[in-house]
Image (cartoon, rainbow, N blue to C red):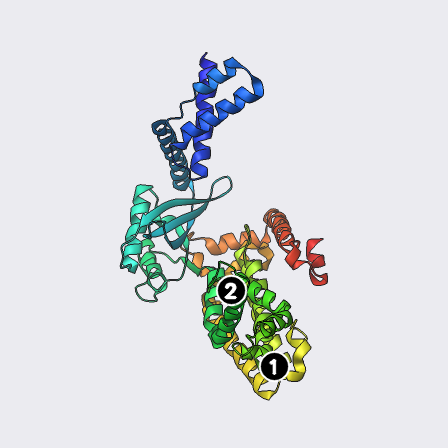
Amino acid sequence: EEKSWKRITETSLHLSLHIAQHFKPFSDGIYLKQSISKAVKTLFHNAEMEKIVEKFPMTCFTVKRIILALHGDISRQITDNLKNCQFFSMCLDEIVDLCGKARLAIIVKFHTSRMEEELIDLSSLSTTIKSQDYLNSIKETIIKNNIDINQLISVTTDGTPAMIGRLNGLIQLLKREVHHPIFSFHYLIHHQALWAKQNFQTYTNLQSNVVKIINQLLIQLIAEVEGLLMYMEVRWLSRGRMLERFCECINEVEIFLDQKDLLDKFIHINDVTWRVRLYFIFDMAIFFNGLNKHLQGHGIMIDSMFSSVKGFVQKLNLIKRKIENSHYSMFTLLKQHTCHIDNTLQQEFLSFLTSTIETFSQRFIDFSEISKLFKVVRPPHLLENLDDYEFFNWISSNLDSELIDLKNNVVYFNKFEEMNWHLEKIEAKIYDREEYKSPQNIVLTC
């Protein structure tokens, strides 16, 4: 009997967890219990099993109590692990909940027997948010979870001015709190998206015209989605796909508009210069989508991500040099229409690329300044000028000596080699995705 009740209680825990994971109301516990009871009755015709199901404690109050107990247990485990870890990093993201209220998501990453990544708080924010408000929320979370803030080693933010202000931004306030240097990063993907939004303002009208044409097509097809949002301003994958689909069928679109006597309304679709600009923007969007996809994914090391960014900037410089020599081989659509590219368009594209390279380099300057420190996560023999690692002196007074030992110890070298083997596997999985398959990337997936 005792064993039976233990299983019943365990089942209630699993069902309540299932309800919580799917964001269902606590009252669904009764509905779930009734569904299981009917399924058991239909499948097994066993009165004894039906009686067991009827014993499941799944009332609204019970489900709530179980979920709160699970939450408390998980919170205690996270707190205990944070107390025992040597260092932790923090990720901050301002979000808006379903009620339209601003909240600060606080995520920490730390090492126990393995790497852990946990959301430890969703703290409420006031309507007028300042850097001090962010700091107060973080302090409350730190105190509530009994965490030593001096173990903080890096902070990643979503890049709002209140977070990254050079004088009184949150990062500066945190540095004063912890009394030692900390890494500060801005989300790489968000960085790239903000940059793209800023630089592509030059072609806002062109993209707006594309959206108007698509909406007109939907109206003609009696669709109920007039005014549909075709892409998100900071989501370049959606923008790139929108342009790609439009360019693939632009001739058919022109025929359709002609049949519906709408060409006069969208006269620019017949303009060769307009089309050339469209193909240029499409090809550039494809380049950015490639970088965006490469920065996404779980387990990618920061030095690998920054290498992708540096490589992308070098590709932009290569594209610029090719355009200066009137070579458009790197473009998918634009290279098919080079006969329509006059000197004015060429200078326009060069100006766009120059501005792009400058803006891109400026936005990632914080990564450039500390990129030399990334080598510490790679094989020890790559450690060169030990003076570069003075940033870490607060961790240990004998850091220089320890780094020399790390660099010359064969055991450590082999350990890093093993770690790099796992990192290469992660990279190979990324390049093995369908969108990355190409002759150039085959060697990376072997």
Pick the front one: 385 or 439:
439
Q: In terms of secondary structure, where does tag 2 sit?
A: helix
Give the answer, above or below, for where 330 lies relative to 128.
Answer: below
Give the answer, above or below, for where 278 lies relative to 226.
Answer: below
Sort mark 1 into few (<14), some (14-19) or many (20+) by Cα contacts within 10 Å: few
Pick the front one: 66 or 359:
66
Q: Which residue is mark 2?
A: 219
Kindly identify the residue that appears in the image at 51 percent across and 66 percent down: 215
Can you see residue 383?
no
Kindly identify the residue that appears in the image at 44 percent across and 17 percent down: 5
Type of amino acid at the residue the image marks with label 1: Val
Kindly identify the residue that appears in the image at 38 percent across and 40 percent down: 83
Q: Position of residue 91 (x, y in %)?
A: 42, 53
Pick the front one: 266 or 177:
266
Pick the front one: 249 or 325:
249
Q: Which residue is mark 1?
A: 272
Give the answer, above or below, for where 169 lies relative to 300.
Answer: below
